């Protein structure tokens, strides 16, 4: 087929972009109320519609939403938060690894849980985690890393591990630390996992109880973070690398750890941008420059700006509107650097209404802009402006095929 | 997440609601021609679109349509009419049971079938069925119950039964009653089923041939219902209870046995309404009162009004239009009792065009009304009025996720 000169794809995600009518915006959504001249122009020149990141009505997360949008069915591949949280905080996670979400907790000398969150510890967890990371138990390597506050992740890598084990975290206080056990007593692989986990927990107590960080906490009257309690085991799915899956050379310019972790796991080039704060104050101009620069040696970029989701969670309509306007300016900046060969899509990974403060299941609006699109009647970009657009109602997993078709880089399926 | 005060969901199904242009309505459908001020108001305030109960073009039934709408993929779970008919006439059916559709039939002394429908017997079948119900054969319990006219259902419960057996009903007259046999001679479980079924059929003849009901029939010159001929075996699927599947506390207020049976099987509270006739003369006001009352201790109600399907099957455009207007009045009655926290959806389980007199595969119009919806440009409710609505084109299985998202009761899928 005829190829574009220098075909390039940019999939821009406004995290939590979708919204519902806001009373403070006279019944408009933040996206509808925002002044977005560039997105509106692209909507006029391009093709728009509605996109369910996972499926209609499903209240997804950023992990399940991005998996789906990147072409990996979460109903098949999403095995729980453990693996994705571990990826998100930068642990090296591979297919087949077992991952656990963990808390630093406080136990007394009888190993009774006194505080599941160790006083919501905020400092010193990196040093505590470093004291546990790399532990070898039998032939299993335990990778361990701190996350935000009392949270951490544990990854087990080794032969013959099963994923059907109970939590060590009792999800309650005043009770003894339970042992992990295999759900099925005849499941030798999961029994092995339980044995390793129980030993990791015991050793975490031995190593942490008199750690200098905890000596200091005791001296300050704070509960020591003297044990690690794993929960929510997940078997890391085997996912084909993104570039192999779609025939691309991709970069991932995103703000949040969870999505960075997915990009890293899919072997995309994850590019960090100084000034990208994942907040409403983020430097979208710096993100725009990073996108333009990354096209020098990539032909596909996933870019996620976190701010709209922050505005939604904070019930901050004005803040969500303002970050959407900053994104519009960033899109103008990127197009100004040259749109020759560019295929552009803009949408959200889920809906985070300001009136709700959490994710909901409505579709996000989506626009496709490329030299090849059939412009439709849509004249602006918004949740309702795209109704009746040429795209109709699609799903997250449809986006990459649509983009790679416009880019002219998709293998023909058939003869 | 923020919850609505007292979130409640009402999914109202006009059975066979969808239709095609009717010459006697000047090319309008009954729904389009009906005067439906309340549905039109809800369409203006809500969000509309097209809904394929199963998939585009599929001519579904009320069983497959409701399964799909309630969130159970019929392509995965629908194993034939047997189990659903048995549920529908009130037999206790459990996952793993084998169910058969049966006829009361007439055979001569040589067991040659003389009348497959026993003269379309209408009276006395309850007594005949009672004489067979509860039969024990080997360690299998045979539950048997009459349905309408010559129809009945047989349910086998016991260990080691296979579902791959041929019909006993020869689907012809003047031929001997055949024996059920396993489709695969090496399939011991199905061979066992065949053995049980054949013994049930033989015993049915022995028990029924001189039953008083048949003595009276012979005296009246009517063919005796002296044998039961099973056909259409189906293995009852294991379905998660509706409330567990969706996180709801539900009631089922429906008029037809088939749908009641599904509700009962899904462990919904099935509420019978005096005056609900499943005909055009049904007491929709009583149904409306039952819905309002049921919200006292349920947060989700499936309500089905059968009349539109009756009008379609009877090729009665005026009748279908009139029952739709009664439904509109019932919706007004329900909303007048309070719409605080209500999420409402109205659609059909399939299309039954007056011009066809049977089910066809077109989508049904659907409307969603809730505090959170993004009102779209639709200003009335009808097959064509919803084209271009914000819902686009969805499927039956999408309805519950959309409703539970609006209700604010859906678990988040991901982080």
Image (cartoon, coloured by chain):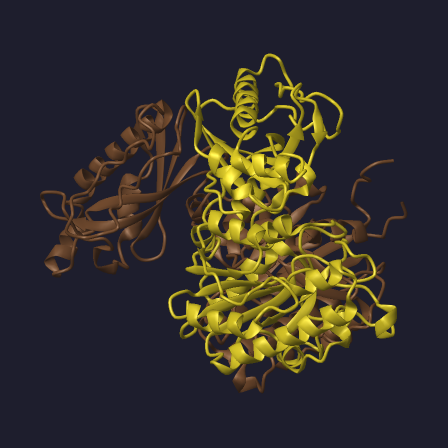
Chain colours: A brown, B yellow
Q: Is residue A106 left or right of residue B336?
A: left
Q: Position of residue B384 (x, y in %)?
A: 78, 70
Q: Position of residue B385 (x, y in %)?
A: 76, 73
Q: Residue at (66%, 64%) from the top-left corner?
A: B307
From the viewer's perspective, is residue A362 above or below residue A321? above
Q: Position of residue A128 (x, y in %)?
A: 26, 47
Residue reaching furthest to the front: B219
Judging depth in this view, the residue of A326 and A286 nearest the camera is A326
Judging depth in this view, the residue of B114 and A164 nearest the camera is B114
Q: Is residue B203 left or right of residue A415?
A: left
Residue reaching furthest to the top: B186
The image shows a total of numbered marks equal to 0
Can residue B397 be seen here? The reply is yes
Q: Residue at (79%, 64%) from the top-left corner?
A: A390
Q: Position of residue B255 (x, y in %)?
A: 56, 60
Q: Is residue A149 left or right of residue A304?
A: left
Judging depth in this view, the residue of A15 and B410 nearest the camera is B410
Judging depth in this view, the residue of A26 and A227 nearest the camera is A26
From the viewer's perspective, is residue A26 above or below residue A372? below
* Quadrant of residue B149 within the rendered picture: top right
From the viewer's perspective, is residue B190 above or below residue B314? above
Where is the N terminus of chain B found, in terms of image quarters?
A: bottom left
Can residue B162 be seen here? The reply is no
Q: Residue at (43%, 71%) from the top-left corner?
A: B293
């Amino acid at each position: 087929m005829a190829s574009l000169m220098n075909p390039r794809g940019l999939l821009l995600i406004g995290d939590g972009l979708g919204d519902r009518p806001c009373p403070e915006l006279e019944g408009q959504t933040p996206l509808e109320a925002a002044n977005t001249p560039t997105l509106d122009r692209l909507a006029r020149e391009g093709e728009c519609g509605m996109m369910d990141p996972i499926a209609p009505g499903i209240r997804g997360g950023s992990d399940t939403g991005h998996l789906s949008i990147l072409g990996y069915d979460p109903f098949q591949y999403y095995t729980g938060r453990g693996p994705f949280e571990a990826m998100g905080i930068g642990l090296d996670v591979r297919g087949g690894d077992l991952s656990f979400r963990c808390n630093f907790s406080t136990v007394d000398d009888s190993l009774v849980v006194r505080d599941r969150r160790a006083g919501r510890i905020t400092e010193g967890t990196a040093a505590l985690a470093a004291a546990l990371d790399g532990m070898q138990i039998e032939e299993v390597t335990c990778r361990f890393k701190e996350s935000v506050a009392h949270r951490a992740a544990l990854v087990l890598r080794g032969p013959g591990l099963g994923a059907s084990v109970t939590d060590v975290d009792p999800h309650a206080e005043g009770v003894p630390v339970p042992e992990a056990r295999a759900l099925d007593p005849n499941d030798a692989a999961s029994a092995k996992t339980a044995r390793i986990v129980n030993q990791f927990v015991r050793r975490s107590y031995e190593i942490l109880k008199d750690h200098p960080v905890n000596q200091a906490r005791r001296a300050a009257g704070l509960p020591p973070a003297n044990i690690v309690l794993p929960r929510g085991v997940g078997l890391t799915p085997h996912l084909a690398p993104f570039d192999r899956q779609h025939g691309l050379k991709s970069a991932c310019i995103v703000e949040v750890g969870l999505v960075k972790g997915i990009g890293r796991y899919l072997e995309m080039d994850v590019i960090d941008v100084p000034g990208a704060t994942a907040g409403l104050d983020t430097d979208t101009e710096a993100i725009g420059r990073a996108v333009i620069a990354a096209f020098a040696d990539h032909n596909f970029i996933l870019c996620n700006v976190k701010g709209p989701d922050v505005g939604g969670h904070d019930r901050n309509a004005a803040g969500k509107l303002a970050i959407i306007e900053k994104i519009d300016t960033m899109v103008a900046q990127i197009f100004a650097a040259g749109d020759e060969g560019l295929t552009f899509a803009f949408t959200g990974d889920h809906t985070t209404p300001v009136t709700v403060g959490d994710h909901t299941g409505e579709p996000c609006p989506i626009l496709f802009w490329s030299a090849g699109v059939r412009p439709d009647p849509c004249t602006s970009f918004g949740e309702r402006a795209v109704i009746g657009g040429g795209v109709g109602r699609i799903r997250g997993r449809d986006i990459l095929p649509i983009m790679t078709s416009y880019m002219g880089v998709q293998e023909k399926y058939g003869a």
